[in-house]
Amino acid sequence: MSIHRFGIALTILLGSSTGLSAAEWDVPGDFSSIQAAVLAAAAGDVITVAPGTYTGRLDFRGKDVVVQSSDGPEHTIIDGGGMTSCVLFLQGETNDAVLDGFTVTGGRGSMHESFLTGGGIHIVNSSPSIRNCVLRNNTAHFGGGIAIWEGSPSIENCVFEYNHASGDGGGLRLHYYTTAIIRDCVFFENTADVFGGGITYGHYSEGQQIDCIFDGNTAGLRGGAISSACDCNDPRLIRSSFCNSVPDHILGGWQDFGGNDFCAICDMDVTADGVVDVNDILQVIAAWGGCICVEDVDGDTVVGVDDLLAVIAAYGDCPS
């Protein structure tokens, strides 16, 4: 064994057996891959990653360690290669498990409850901290950028752009009693085939969007920026802005804690022809009944009187 490797092994042994202060590791200085550093690290350790593209999946393996880049997301990339989720938090990691300063791209999701979820980052029963990251060009059925199943993560100063969900939550999907704090984040041109181009809330989830920007996010049916069709969810918006959402900004209920700004859009134009007129009314009537469709403008899965009245109330030319 080389003197260098002997030193690493001795440090790991002493740290795990005597509870000494956290160790600091460098990639690729001490380890050739980020995953190798995480496997060797103990709780509280800090792993600093040099610029470069690191291909493959990173699994935190239940360890509350800090994985940070030295030069920021522009120069430090985790690339899933279109095979799986790029980063996994699956074993009860807490807010002390930190991913800081990476571009996360090329993720395709991990199988969870029969669906590919969490293209970029997949979180289950865990509550990590994700900071200063760019989630770009990831795909999944639920949560193209990030999917969270039952956790309380903190997501701060991150950019979600060009992610896609074939189901819900192009940028981010929160599900199953998840509580998230989302602060100073940008959601730009994310798409979902069904609901929630930017974010989808599901099954008793709640979150705070604080000082966030939503621009150009698109849903195939409703909730271009945010979807929260069930009354069981609780999105809370604080000083956030919404522009260029298609076909609407928000589907479902949410709490306004002040300082939010919405650009004018034409969310009752179900025919997408630039005007709310008799054609939209006729299309709503034609879809009458149980339906998960664009004519269900209030998102309650039934096209009925409330949807018709909402379209009539918006009658006229769409805002330019």
Image (cartoon, rainbow, N blue to C red):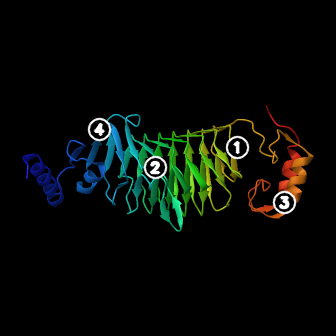
Q: Amino acid at mark 2?
A: Ser
With 267 as the anchor, is 182 left or right in this view? Answer: left
Query: Which comes before the other along the chain, label 2 or label 3?
Result: 2
From mark 1 to mark 2, how far is it between C-alphas? 27 Å
* Position of 202 relative to 268 (above/below): below
From mark 1 to mark 4, how far is it between C-alphas? 39 Å
Residue where numbered disc 4 is placed: 50
Q: Amino acid at mark 3?
A: Ala
Circle 4: element type: loop
Query: Which comes before the other along the chain, label 1 or label 2?
Result: 2
Q: Amino acid at mark 1?
A: Val
Q: Is residue 242 visible?
A: yes
Label 2 crowd bin: few (<14), some (14–19), many (20+), radius 10 Å: many
| x and y, in percent, of residue 115 in the image | 54, 64
Q: Are the residues flagged by discs 1 and 4 in contact, CB closer than 8 Å? A: no
Q: Are the residues flagged by discs 2 and 3 in contact, CB closer than 8 Å? A: no
From mark 3 to mark 1, how far is it between C-alphas? 20 Å
Q: Are the residues flagged by discs 4 and 3 in contact, CB closer than 8 Å? A: no
Q: At x 8% / y 53%, what residue is drawn?
A: 1
Q: Is residue 44 visible?
A: no
For the residue pair 98 and 247, the one nearer the viewer reads as 247
Q: Amino acid at mark 4?
A: Ala
Residue where numbered disc 1 is placed: 246
| x and y, in percent, of residue 124 in the image | 45, 62
For the residue pair 72 and 209, the one nearer the viewer reads as 72
Find residue 114 and name its label: none
Q: Quadrant of residue 201?
A: bottom right
Residue where numbered disc 3 is placed: 287
| x and y, in percent, of residue 38 in the image | 28, 53
With 70 as the anchor, is 89 left or right in this view? Answer: right
Numbered disc in front, either 4 or 2: 4
Residue where numbered disc 2 is placed: 154
